[in-house]
Image: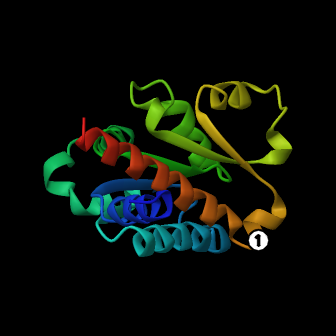
Amino acid sequence: MSFDERIDEILSLSAAMKLNVLIWGPGKSATQQYIKREKMRQQIKNAFINADVRFSEDLVEAASGRTKDLTIPEQELFHFAACDICFVLDISKGAGEEIAHFINSGFGHKLVILTHEKYKDSSSFPAALRKYGNQLFFNDEEYEHCHLVDRVVSRVRLLAIGKLGRLFL
């Protein structure tokens, strides 16, 4: 089998991997930013047919019987533990709070923080926390033209290929 054929096979197999993807970020009240989150979710679902792509607010409603006595951060910790990867669109106060709360939770390696490049060299306390995470920086053009979504899908693809590799060990 040639390299091209093998790469096509790997891409096909990785697209079929079962994945749990969590996306944190602005809620419905932040209309334009929420639309970006929705686009991320849809593009991931389109690229990975067996991916379960959720927002925590979806899971709070769906799992209310199992976790109803827990606070929102405690429920989100369950969601975070159950995901393979979590993207946080770091453009709202709530997203920053989720980063601060969960970066050192023991699951921080699952967190991919999507941060505007203007904060790349910031020396603030929130910036210091973000440096412990896996950050992808974006600029205005990438955000506006949804190239950031393409980068997110590429990151999920790398995760899927990694999971695929573990199946053959």
Which image quadrant: the C terminus?
top left
Q: Residue at x 53, y 67 (%)?
A: 40
Work out which quarter of the rendered image holds the N terminus and state it. Answer: bottom left
Whether residue 113 is visible, yes or no, is yes
Label 1 CA crowd tier, 10 Å (few <14, some 14–19, many 20+): few
Pinpoint residue 118: horizontal percent, then vertical percent.
85, 45
Q: Is residue 28 visible?
A: no
Looking at the rendered structure, the kind of residue marked 1 is: Glu
Residue pictured at 44% horizontal, 70% vertical:
47
Residue 155 sits above or below residue 54 on the image: above
- Residue 39 lies, with reference to residue 114, above or below; the image says below
**Relative side of 88 to 125, left or right:** left
The residue under the point 23% across, 62% down is: 62
| Residue 14, image x, y percentages | 37, 59
* Residue 18 position in % (x across, y down): 27, 58
Picture residue at 40% right of the left edge, 50% below the top = 161
Q: How is the image coloured?
A: rainbow
Quarter occupied by residue 58: bottom left
Q: Write down the residue under mark 1.
A: 144
Q: Is residue 80 left or right of residue 146?
A: left
115 left or right of 84 in image: right
**Circle count:** 1
> 75 or 118, which lies in front?
118
On the image, which quarter does residue 81 sit in? top left
- Where in the figure is residue 158, as x and y percent of width and height? 48, 49
On screen, residue 131 above or below 145: above
Dot 1: element: helix
Pick the residue in front: 65 or 148: 148
